[in-house]
Image (cartoon, rainbow, N blue to C red):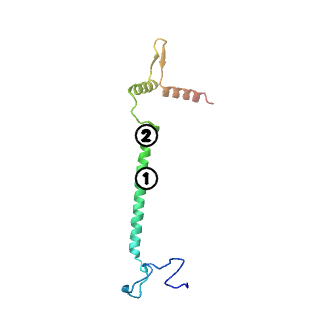
Amino acid sequence: MPHTLAHLEHEHEQPDAWHRHTPEEGAPQAEHASQVNTMALGLVFVVMTVTIVAIGTLVGMYFERHITKMRRERVEIVEPIATPQLEYRQATRNDLATYGWANEQAQTVRVPVESTFNTIIQEYADQAP
């Protein structure tokens, strides 16, 4: 069978209605999509771009908030410290910062750490040539 415009073997055995125009449509037929509305395409592009950026930002904010919460719970352990540990910590800090008896029966005293550091530094400074 010879190749004609009405019949192309490698595409269709018989052309369907989409490939043919009926006499009711009139002649000549305009090329499909020959006139492009660039304003509409530009608007669609801008709307899609803004939407994608907004969704990405929201997902990023959610992810950051979720990761921060997980880090607080699992790594940093921001739960309130139990009362005995808090009392021990405060007592230890107080002992390191104040003068007092370390053992009154043995006549040993407690000296603040900062004061001890400053005394040792001054002694070394006095010995320097």
Tell whether 40 sits left or right of 120. Answer: left
Mark 1 residue element? helix
Residue at 58 percent across and 30 percent down: it is 125
Residue 65, compared with residue 57, is above or below; it is above
| Mark 2 closeness class: few <14, some 14–19, many ≥20 residues within 10 Å | few
Residue 6 at x, y percent in the picture: 49, 84
Give the percent coordinates (x, y) of residue 59: 42, 53
For marks 2 and 1, give the CA distance: 18 Å
Q: Earlier in the sequence, mark 2 or mark 1?
A: 1
Report the residue at 41% width, 47% height from top.
65
Q: Relative to the observer, which residue lies in front, 113 or 19?
A: 19
Q: Position of residue 52 (x, y in %)?
A: 42, 60
| Local secondary structure at mark 2 | helix
The residue that label 2 is drawn on is: 72
Relative to 89, residue 30 above or below = below
| Disc 2 residue type (three-letter) | Arg
Residue 79 image offset from top left, x and y in percent: 40, 34
Say which quadrant the N terminus sits in.
bottom right
**Against 78, is 51 above or below?**
below
Disc 1 crowd rating (10 Å Cα; few below 14, some 14-19, many 20+) is: few
Quarter of the image with the C terminus is: top right
Residue 14 got which mark? none
Specify the amino acid type for callout 1. Answer: Gly
Give the quarter of the image for residue 83: top left
Residue 60: mark in rendering = 1
Q: Residue furthest bottom?
A: 27
Question: Is 121 situated above or below 48?
Answer: above
- Rendered image quadrant of residue 67: top left
